[in-house]
Image (spheres, helix red, strand yellow):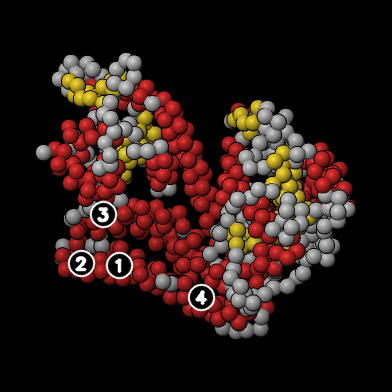
Amino acid sequence: MILTKNLKWLDENYPNALEKLNGRKEVDSFQIETAKNGQCTIVFSGKERPVYLHSKYNPLNEAEAFIQSFGQLNDYEHIFFYGVGLGYHIDLFLQKYPHLTFSIYEPEVEVFRHLIAQKLLSDLPVKRLRNIYIERKAEDQTEFITDFVSGVSGKTLLIALPVYELVNPTRFSNFVTQFRETLNHQLFSFSADLRFEKRWAVNSLKNLPYTLTSPNVLLDFADVFKDKPAIIVAAGPSLEEDIPIIRKIKENGMAYIFSVGSAIKALIKNGIHPDAACTYDPMPWNHMVFEDVTNQNIDSIPLFYGTSVGYETLEFYPGPLAHMITSQDTLAAYFLKRTDNRQLEGVFDAPTIAIVTLELLHRLGCNPIILAGQNLAYKGDQFYSKGIGYEYRPAGLTVEEVASAKKIKDVYGNTILTSPGFDRMRIQMEYVIKQFGINNVYNTTKGGAHIEGTTFIQIEELVKKLQDKKVNPGWFKQESKYSTEFMINRLRHLVLQKDLLKSILDSMLRLLKDLKSPQILSSSSKLDKKMAEFEGMMKVLESNAFYQTIIQPMNRLQKNLLVRALEAKAVRLEKNKVSRAKRISELSRAYFEGCLGDLDIVTPIFNEVADKLLTQHGAAV
């Protein structure tokens, strides 16, 4: 009876988990036994000695001691249980911490079969249950971890039942490592969205006049760089050793030189002007990277900028501009249309401009692509190459950076120290190399991190292969191929959409207030009508162009959190209409108030940009 009910419940709520259960049965190395206190336990017979998933004397006491070992968990929002067994520890955790949501992961199909024959899953606090994962094959692990982590929105604790390490040590270790690394990467991305989401939108808007009148690097320079060697010069501490060779390459036109990040400072200090500088950082202080160029009024170095770069960078930069449409720019696709009817192309956002530039050069057809100063690790006590310094941080390592350093392999196979941030960059660079199938990258960084997919070669050896002159001195052409008429028409439409948006958001907030009104809640028909109005107004909001291109991107993280909250079982399975309406109102109000506040902030910025564009192109709304 219990098994039948559980299978029906899984079919209705977690069909993917049921599909895993319905697969071919494995040899069952797990058996139910009765513990000394009369409770059930599970014994694993696949080892030389039997392994008990729960105590063979008193499983409940063991679970209580296990819980105590974690101390207080009030700061956490979600628990991910790896290894369910018969669920003793899960029941106690959820009773002790009624605020926690949870997910279940069982790596042994047969153990889960024993569980659902013993315990009703519907007795769990199912409104707090996010998902059930049942691993059947090794590939499931990566898929399930990715699925879970993609929806993480709060502080999460992994609780792995320790005995599962005895059952399969390699699988256990791999899971814990992959889970933590994937979660840390997601939290870094989560943090980036929180820090940058409003800057990305404002920058893309304020940069629009520059973008409309500058070349698109991917579309307008492909014939310039195809099959030409290119060097990405980064600011790592090994750069100073390579300066003499880089100067020789520049003087003889052997390869195109692209500086990324702070490397421009070291190059200028050594009298080397790169063929282009690349930048994408959205923060307001990014322009400080180019203060040497600005102070010396060097107007001969083209700047390849991501369209969501800090707008201050373009306002100060004295040289020619060309743009890369970034994946964070939601305005480009709305405003830009090529006069030659070619489709827009852009680059993906990444943790470092070096990775963005690597993708860019690969897609431009550069061959080979050479990395210099790309340490992605510390060198002695150096953070940057000599000649690079900022007021806000020393050139050397801080005490905190040394304390948090981790060990990796360098290009020679030796152990070196790196930071968690540098290591994320290395992992992401390796991912991009693999994802794009890039097979022509030479890493010349002496003592730098080993980067999978690249070939290490001393720059002194590599330069021998670059003897022919490859650089065309007059390669940069300041020409834009965007339709002014298309942009003006879109701008006019967006002005109208902006004016409509305020009334839409005001209506949304009034409806949310109504959904908590006793007068509305006491009448089923009135409540149904208000809920229908709310859903209809949501569709109107989602179709508003100003909301789509500017306001929603400024609140992308909050929107994702709201969608997840509204899709959670606590809301979705709520059968009481009054409780559901109240919950929707409570969850949604802060988001729409935030949108309204951002509309007030961005309106004068939009008006300023619109006036500039219309003046620039001789049109009037």
Question: What residue is pinned by disc 2?
Answer: 528
- Rate crowding at label 3 as few (under 14), some (14 to 19) or many (20 or more) other CA atoms within 10 Å: few
Where is mark 4, residue-wise? Answer: 494
Sooner in the amino-acid sequence: mark 2 or mark 3: 2
The amino acid pointed to by label 1 is Glu
First in sequence, mark 4 or 3: give its number.
Answer: 4
Classify the position of the N terminus by image quarter: top left
Q: Earlier in the sequence, mark 1 or mark 2?
A: 2
Secondary-structure class at tag 1: helix
Using the numbered discs, state the Cα–Cα distance from disc 2 to disc 3 in whole angstroms. 16 Å
> Which residue is tagged 1?
535
- The answer to which of marks 4 and 2 sits earlier in the sequence is 4
Q: Position of residue 567 (x, y in %)?
A: 31, 54
Which residue is label 3 attached to? 572
Neighbour class for label 2 at 10 Å: few (<14), some, many (≥20)?
A: some
Q: Is residue 60 above or below residue 11?
A: above
Q: Is residue 559 left or right of residue 488?
A: left
Q: Earlier in the sequence, mark 4 or mark 1?
A: 4
Q: Quadrant of residue 47?
A: top left
Q: Which secondary structure, mark 3?
A: helix
